[in-house]
Image (cartoon, rainbow, N blue to C red):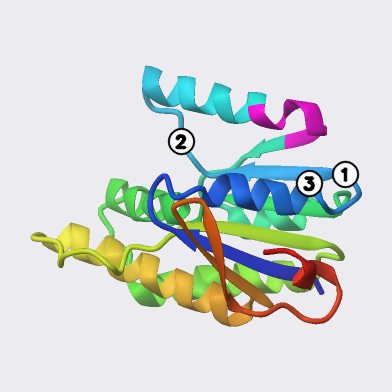
Amino acid sequence: MAEMILVTGGSRSGKSGYAQELAEAIPGPRAYIATCPVIDPETVERVAKHREARRASDWETIEETVDLAGAIRRSAAYRVILVDCLTLWVNNLLYEAGQRGDVFTEEETAVRCRGVIEACGAFPGTVLFVTNELGMGIIPDNETARRFRDCAGCCNQMIAKAAGTVTLVVAGIPLRLKPGRSGGSARYG
């Protein structure tokens, strides 16, 4: 069973950098599962910067916007997986459903999250997840934005419950919310 670590925080809080530091402190081959779809020139530039930040540490990048459980199952050769980020993954699932004319719900989010947790159950190393904490802002003014917030909140709660360690990053400072088991990631943060 994988050791699961969730790193959450607001946009530009330093959570991705913190999660990468944790991952790089663990020996072994590392995979970075990128959930961000490359949709415009600005995104291309962001992706290039993220790849450059990982270049010195021998990361393998796996781009997977929707089948996160499958990507984790296909990554058994790695010791560490960093998934960045769950919020974009939920966004992609909502978008894909909309393209089919379907409505993606919290119930479907829960099904997908259970699949991810099950995939982690078969992974022998450490899986770190990065996500955005969306529940601290105003209530969105439209149904689609509220559904996104609700689905992302459902995902965050399920992954946090399954994770041994949950850390909130605020202004670059990690705050441990759920302690890890002895050994492993318990020394981080």
Looking at the rendered image, the quarter that the N terminus falls into is bottom right
Q: Vertically, is 154 above or below 152? A: below
Image-quadrant location for residue 154: bottom left
The x, y position of residue 98, in whole percent, is 28, 51
Q: Amino acid at mark 2?
A: Pro
Q: Amino acid at mark 1?
A: Pro
Q: Vertically, is 127 above or below 11? A: below
Residue found 10% across the figure and 60% down from its top = 142
Q: Are marks 1 and 3 in contact (CB under 8 Å)?
A: no
Residue found 28% across the figure and 59% down from its top = 102
The x, y position of residue 136, in whole percent, is 28, 68
Q: Which residues are magenta?
A: 53-60
Taking depth in this image into account, of 7 and 126 the one nearest to the observer is 7
Find disc 2 in the rendering and name its residue: 37
- 166 displayed left or right of 10: right
Find disc 1 in the rendering and name its residue: 29
Mark before the other along the chain sequence, 2 or 1: 1
Residue 103 at least partly seen: no
The residue carrying pointer 1 sits among few (fewer than 14), some (14 to 19) or many (20 or more) residues within 10 Å by Cα, namely some
Image-quadrant location for residue 53: top right
Q: Vertically, is 17 above or below 136? A: above
The x, y position of residue 57, in whole percent, is 80, 34
Q: Amino acid at mark 3?
A: Glu
Name the chief secondary structure element in magenta.
Answer: helix
Helix, strand or loop at mark 3: helix
